[in-house]
Structure formats: structure tokens, C-alpha cells
Image (tube, rainbow, N blue to C red):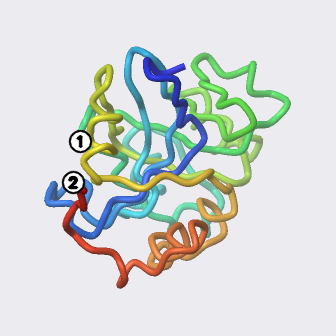
């Protein structure tokens, strides 16, 4: 649990319209982990110009599934942008991957190359999103940003990650909250 008792694991962070940080403006982040040490998440709505096919070629793997090969790799955040992170639905064989973080009641994130090998062989997770880089916050940093109205939070839904067109993910995440982003002020209100 986070130090003040809130745990945002398996939630979406939705950047407030006034977010000035270019990495996060207009972003939706899936939080894979949130505890007293900090938080780790992946931006799910910022595709890059790199395709999965090109990424797999870089690691000497062939991706036979042409539809999958054409999908974009996403910008997951500004930390370790040379490293790949695979966000996927949990599956029975996840224990077979060398490095998987299973989000309680949520998705799974795998960082080891064996998941890519499994995907290339057609045995990997069917529903997935691959990012380069991740978003990280030190202890208390995310809570502070939320307290300053930088982020909204809402319980995550896998369908938003895997089934919603990328250009609709921000709006759809806001709709999960029942909020129209056009109605949000960029200013924090303090009594």
C-alpha cells in the first residue's frame, strides 16, 4: 500500500487538461504497481512510429502475424526508453516468462525477451500492448501530483487498453469517470 493508504494499482491515471509536461499531456497511464516505494505505469495512448514488426526484427525475431506486425509500439513513459514492456492479459502460462509483474485483479506486464519469443511463435498473449519506456514516480511523488490536480484516477478496464481505438482512449477513460474533459478547469480550486 502507498504510504497514505491509497493504492492505485490497476487504475488509469488520466492527465488533467492543464498538464504541462509534454511526456504526459493528454495521456492515459495504466498503473502496474503503486506502493510505499512509488509507482510504475505505462502510457497506453501514445503510439510511436515504430511497428511491432520492426521492433521484433531489432531483437532478431520474425513476427508472422501481419496484423500484429503492423501495430504500433507505444511510448510508455520517459524512463528506460530503450527497454520494451509488454502489457497483456494474464494467461495460465505467465509463470513461464522470466519477468512478469502480475497486477492483482488486473493485467500483467512482462519485460523479459521470452514473452516476445512466445508472441513470435504464436503462443504468446493474444491481447497485448508493447511500449518502449515506462512512467515512474518516487515515494509520495504521484500522490503529490494528484493532490495538485495533475491527474484523475479511475479503475482500469482491459477493454479500454485492447479494444478502444487509440484516438478514443483519453475520452473513453474520462467517460469511465462520468467526466467531459471540455468541462474541466485547468486551475485547481482551493477554498
Residue 23 marker: 2
C-alpha separation, residue under disc 1 versus residue under disc 2: 7 Å
Residue drawn at (66%, 22%) of the image? 97
Whole-percent x, y for residue 107 in the image: 67, 41
Q: Nearer the viewer, residue 173 or 78?
A: 173
Question: In the rendered view of the protein, which quadrant contains the N terminus?
Answer: top right
Estimate how packed mark 2 is, as few (under 14), some (14 to 19) or many (20 or more) residues with alpha carbons within 10 Å.
some
Q: Position of residue 129 (x, y in %)?
A: 55, 52
At 51% from the left and 65% from the top, the residue drawn is: 71
Q: Which residue is denoted by mark 1 in the rendering?
A: 78
Q: Which of marks 1 and 2 is nearer the N terminus?
A: 2
Q: Is residue 55 left or right of residue 96?
A: left
Local SS, label 1: loop
- What secondary structure is found at the residue carrying circle 2? loop
In the image, is 107 to the left or to the right of 84? right
Q: Residue furthest right?
A: 92
Question: Which residue is at a point 39% across and 78% down the rendered structure image?
Answer: 181
Q: Mark 1 and mark 2 in contact? Answer it, CB < 8 Å.
A: yes
The front one of 45 and 117 is 45
Residue 56 % position (x, y): 47, 46
**Image quarter hosting the C terminus:** bottom left
Residue 166's place in the image compared with 30, above or below, is below
Looking at this rendering, what residue extends furthest in the bottom direction?
A: 182
Q: Which residue is drawn at 21% across and 60% down?
A: 19
Q: Residues within 10 Å of mark 1 (few under 14, many from 20)?
A: some
Residue 13 picture location, percent across and down: 44, 51
Q: Among all residues in the image, which is located at the extreme front?
A: 191
Find residue 74 and report its image quarter. Answer: bottom left
Amino acid at each position: 500500500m502507498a504510504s497514505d493508504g491509497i493504492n492505485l494499482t490497476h487504475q488509469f491515471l488520466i492527465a488533467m487538461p492543464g498538464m504541462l509536461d509534454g511526456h504526459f499531456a493528454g495521456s492515459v497511464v495504466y498503473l502496474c504497481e503503486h506502493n510505499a516505494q512509488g509507482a510504475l505505469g505505462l502510457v497506453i495512448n501514445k503510439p510511436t512510429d515504430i511497428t511491432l514488426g520492426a521492433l521484433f526484427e531489432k531483437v532478431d525475431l520474425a513476427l508472422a502475424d501481419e496484423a500484429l506486425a503492423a501495430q504500433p509500439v507505444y511510448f510508455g513513459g520517459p524512463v528506460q526508453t530503450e527497454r520494451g514492456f509488454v502489457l497483456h492479459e494474464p494467461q495460465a502460462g505467465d509463470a513461464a516468462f522470466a519477468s512478469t509483474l502480475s497486477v492483482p485483479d488486473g493485467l500483467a506486464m512482462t519485460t523479459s525477451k521470452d514473452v516476445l519469443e512466445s508472441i513470435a511463435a504464436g503462443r504468446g498473449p493474444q491481447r497485448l500492448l508493447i511500449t518502449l519506456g515506462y512512467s515512474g514516480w518516487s515515494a509520495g511523488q504521484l500522490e503529490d501530483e494528484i493532490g495538485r490536480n495533475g491527474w484523475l484516477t479511475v479503475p482500469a478496464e482491459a477493454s479500454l487498453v485492447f479494444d478502444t481505438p487509440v484516438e478514443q482512449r483519453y475520452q473513453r477513460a474520462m467517460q469511465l469517470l462520468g467526466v467531459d474533459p471540455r468541462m474541466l478547469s485547468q486551475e485547481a480550486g482551493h477554498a
